[in-house]
Image (cartoon, rainbow, N blue to C red):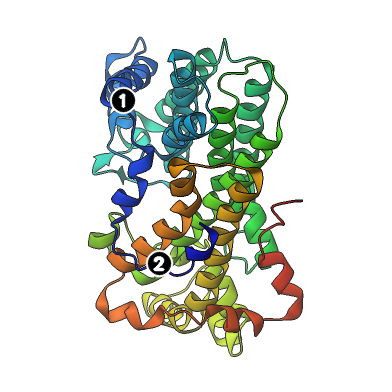
Amino acid sequence: MTGTVLALSGREAPAEVLACLTLPRARAERFEELLTDAALGPVPSLSAALSNTVRRTGKRLRPGLLMAFARAAGADSGPRMLRRAAAVELLHLASLVHDDLMDDATTRGGLPTIHRTHLAAGAVVGGDRLLAAAGLLLADAGPEAHRVWSAAFLEMCDGQALESAHRHRLIPPAEYLRQVRGKTAALISAACVLGVLADRPQAPASAAADAAARYGTCLGVVFQIADDLMDVLSTSERWGKPVEHDVPQGVYTLPVLLAARAPGGEKLAGLLRPEATARDTAAAYGIVRRSGVTPALAVARAWAARAARTLDMAGFTGPLAADLGTLPARYLESVLAHAVPAAHARFVDVSGLKKLHALPPADRPALQPFDPAG
C-alpha cells in the first residue's frame, strides 16, 4: 500500500476516489432523516433555510469516514454509530453557517446563505440549533466519544480564531499548519476516531484510535492544501466554488506563504496589502503559481504518504483499509488531474521536494508530517 502512494495517475475523478465512503442506501436515507430532523424548529422559514443547508449535496466526507473506520475496525455499524455520524456532520454544517456569517458570503451551493435570508441573528441561532441537535444525538455515546467530539469542536474554534487573527499576515508555515489542524483536520480526525470507538462507548483511546486520529489529521491537511492549491490553479467552473478568492480576503494559504519565503518573495510581499488593487492581486497569484505551488504540493504529498504508513503500522488490513490508506494521495492526484485547466498544468510537477529543500532550514521540520509511530 505505501509504495504506490506517490505514483498515482489521477485517472479517477475526486468523487470516484471517495466511493469507499459511500453509505448503503437504507442507511444513507436514515442519515439524511437525522439531519433533516435537526433543522426543524418553531420558525418555519428558518427551518426551511436550515433544511436546505443540511440537504445540500456534498461529499459527506466525515460521516463516510466514521462508517468506514467502524467497518475497518470490525465495529458495530448500527443506529448508534449512525447517530454519531450525524452528530459529526451537524457540527461541520453548523460551522459553515457561522463561517458564512463571518465571511459575509452571499451564497453557498447556489443558494443564499442563512444570514442573507435571516440576518445575523438567524445564522447564529440556526447554527447553534444544529450544534444542540448534534449534542442530543450523542446522548448515548459515552464519555470518550463525547470527549473526542467536544475536543474537535474546541480545536475548530481555535483554528478559526487563528485564521481571523492572521488575516493579511505572512505567518510562518508552522503557524499555518497549526491553524489547519484546528479548523479543518480536527473534525476529520475525530470522525475517524469515533468510528473506531463506535462499538465501545465506555472505552478509552486505543492504539487503533490513536492511528485513526493521526490518519484523519493527515487527510485533513491534504484536503486543505488541495483546496488552497485550487484557489491558485483552478477555475470556478472546474472547482465548483470561487477561486482566486483567498488573497483578496487576506487569507494567505500555504502556496502563498511558501512563495513569499522563496527567493524573490519580497516582491510578492509587497503586493499583499489590504488595499491591493485587482491588478496587484492578479500579479500576486502569478508569482504564487510560479514559486509556491510546487513546494506546497510536495508538502501535501508528504502528508498523504504518511497517512498510508500510519494505518500500515497500526495493523489495519484488508481491502477497505487499503482504500483508506491511499485515499489522501488518490484524492490529491485526482483533483490535480481534473480541476487544473491546461493553462495552469505546467505549474504542477513532481520536483516539489527539491524546492521544499530550498526553503530556509528552519521551515523544513515544521512542514513535515509527524512520525506515525510517535
Picture layout, residue 195 above or below residue 370 = above
Q: Which residue is drawn at 31% across and 55% down?
A: 241
Residue at 27 percent across and 29 percent down: it is: 52
Say which amino acid is labelled 2.
Leu
Residue 173 spot, x, y in % from top left: 65, 66
- The x, y position of residue 233, in whole percent, is 36, 71
Amino acid under disc 1? Ala
Task: Using the image, tell me which numbered label, if any, was put on residue 8.
Answer: 2
Q: Is residue 66 visible?
A: yes
In the figure, is residue 170 to the left or right of 278? right
Residue 141 picture quarter: top right
Residue at image coords 67%, 54%: 178
* Numbered circles on residues, count: 2
- Write down the residue under mark 1: 28
Query: Circles 2 and 1: CB distance less than 8 Å?
Result: no
Image quarter of residue 110: top left
**Is 57 left or right of 175, judged from the image as shown?**
left
**Nearest the eye: 198 or 265:** 198
**Residue 252, percent from left and from top:** 54, 65
Q: Describe the element under mark 1 as helix, strand or loop.
A: helix
Secondary element type, mark 2: loop
Identify the residue at image location x=51%, y=18%: 132
Outermost residue toward the bottom in this view: 264
Pinpoint residue 77: horizontal percent, then vertical percent: 45, 21
**Would you say residue 253 is visible in this rendering?**
no
In the image, residue 178 above or below residue 39: below
Foreground of the two, 191 or 98:
191
Indicate whether 151 appears above or below 280: above
